[in-house]
Structures are given as C-alpha cells and as structure tokens.
Amino acid sequence: MATKDRLLKLYAGGQHVTMPPEKLNDVYTLSKQFTGLLTSSKNSYCSEIEYFQLMELQFYLALQTNHDVEAKKCMDILTDRFNINESEKLIGLRALYLQATVGNEQAFQLLKQSGEIATRGSPLENTSEDLLHLKKKAVLIHQNDPPEKYVEMLLKFSEVTPLDTSVWKELADQYVRLNHYDKAINCLQEILLIQPFAYNIIALLAETELLYIKQLESELKGPGAYVIKDKLTEVRISCRRHFLRSVELCNNYVRGWSGVLAVTSQEISPQRDTTEVKLHHLATQRLKEIQEKKLSSDENLEYVTPILTKYQS
C-alpha cells in the first residue's frame, strides 16, 4: 500500500523531525487514520514488525503536534507488547513522553532509575541500538546544562550516529545561541547531505547565513578586514542561493520568500545589482499573492505584512 510505504519510509529516514508544522499536521492525520485502520483490521495490511514501527512513528508525530493523549495510547500499545523493563528503547520513549508532558526532571529520574545516564557505562561505540536510543534521550535531557557542556555531549553523539538529523539540528540550534553561526551552518549542511530536498532546512541554513552576514559586517573595521570582506561576499551569495532553492522546492513557502525579500533589500545588500532588484520585486509580489489567496497557514500569513513593511525598499 502506498500509504504504508510512505509512512515506513518516514520512519526509516526520520524526515518528520525537520517537517514544517503544516506538513507535519497532515502527516500526523494520515498516520493516525492508517494506524487506526490497522488496529481495527487486526494488522492485516502489514507485518507485526511494520505495525510496531508505524506505532512508534505515530508516537513521535503525536508528541510533535501536541497530541499527548494519542502519544500515550501509542506508547501503551508498545508497552503491552514489549516489557518496558527489558527494552531500553521503550524506556527512552517513556522518558521522551515525560519530557514533553511533565518536564525534564521526571524524565531524568526515569533514566537515572534505569541505570543509564548520558554517556556513563560502556563506550557509545559498543552499545546496542536500543541503548543508543536511550542515551540520545539522556543527552537531550541535559539541554539545561551549561551550553558548552551540552554541545560537547551532542558532538560526541554525532560521531556515533552521523546520520541522525535531529542531533545535527540540535547542535545547530545550540551554536546559534552561542553566536557560532559558522559552526551552525556546518551542522545544517550535514542535514542536507542526508535530506537534500528539505526546503525548511535549506531556508533555515539561509537564515543562519543571514545572521552570519550581520556578524561579519560588525567585524569589518577590525584587523583582517580584507579577508572578512571576501568571506562576506561569499556568504551573501550562498545565502541568496539557499533562499531561492527553498522556494524552488516549495513555491508557497512564506519563510523562503521572506528570506529572498530580506537578502535582496537595500538593508542587507546596499549596492544591489539588477538581478537583486528583480528578485526583490518578485519576492514582494509573491508574498502579496500568498497573502491575498491564503496559500499558507494563518500562522505564516501573520508574518507577511511585517516582513513586507520592513524590507519594502
């Protein structure tokens, strides 16, 4: 079945981690309908392994879309089939549920009771897949630690699971908080090596490059200004290219078009060429069209008028 194959592909690749809210809600609804059908038909549409993989995916989707009751239902189905005291993955899912619904402290206590906290015990390279899953959640629970310590733990985990996009995304977020925009850019590029068509991550990369541009501009009067100037030109070109790529992949993407408008404005590019002026006009018209025809969610449309006002030049 096409729906089953699509959902299993999402489960295997973890694309749901980087989905925009509107698309995530659609996938959640699709998954809920399909898993409900599986439950009522006694799993005649898939194998037992596929059934529990889809239930785990539905658990994640429910948490991401704030459907806590549905997430608890999925977790109960998994717990009924597998012994939570013997499954490190289930302990990790339980900790994740507690973290999302109650708080970090309760999740931490559960992991503490399980005897596996962060990176204690045997080296990560020698642990099972389930234990890696559990330790990842333990690492994330330490997000309230000093930023440098948290980043160090995330880096260690990224070395073991280099294809885990959620770890790279978390690292990028932390680097932005620390104003290390160049390092955040590298982390987002790692995600795109795994998911090259993730237009939301491409736009996020461009937004991070925009922050990096402002940081470089503030350093122009210091030593090595000529080197910084060359770097600034390089990042500006890359930033514009990434915003354009995001709207190429999703023509109604407000965040992408807002970025195109910003990066081609006089505020960001004081000495605009003809191409930038044309792109600025195109982005203005496209945002107005998306707003007038309501081609995006209400949440996204709220940002259109302020963006148009700010970068109208």
Image (spheres, helix red, strand yellow):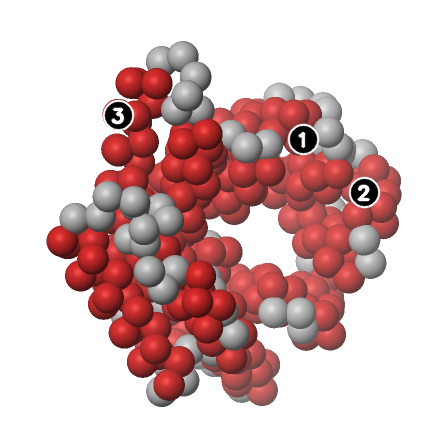
Mark 3 or 1, which is nearer the eye?
3
Q: Quadrant of residue 261?
A: bottom left
Q: Which residue is mark 3?
A: 230
Q: Which residue is mark 1?
A: 147
What amino acid is found at the position of numbered circle 2 in the picture?
Phe
Q: What is the spatial separation of the Cα atoms under label 2 and label 1, in whole angstroms?
A: 18 Å
Q: Residues within 10 Å of mark 1 (few under 14, many from 20)?
A: some
Residue at the extreme top = 223
Q: Residue at x 30, y 69 (%)?
A: 284
In the displayed structure, would residue 146 be above or below residue 134?
above
* Residue at numbered disc 2: 108
Q: Position of residue 146 (x, y in %)?
A: 73, 29
Above or below, 151 relative to 100: above
Q: Residue at x 36, y 87 (%)?
A: 293
Give the distance between the C-alpha atoms of the residues marked 3 and 1, in whole angstroms. 31 Å
Q: Nearer the viewer, mark 2 or mark 3?
A: 3
- Visible residue check, residue 287: yes
The reply, left or right, for residue 216 in relation to residue 92 is left
In-front residue for pair 104/217 = 217
**SS class of the residue under badge 2?**
helix
Q: Give, as a three-letter code, the residue at label 3.
A: Asp
Position of 110 relative to 30 (above/below): above
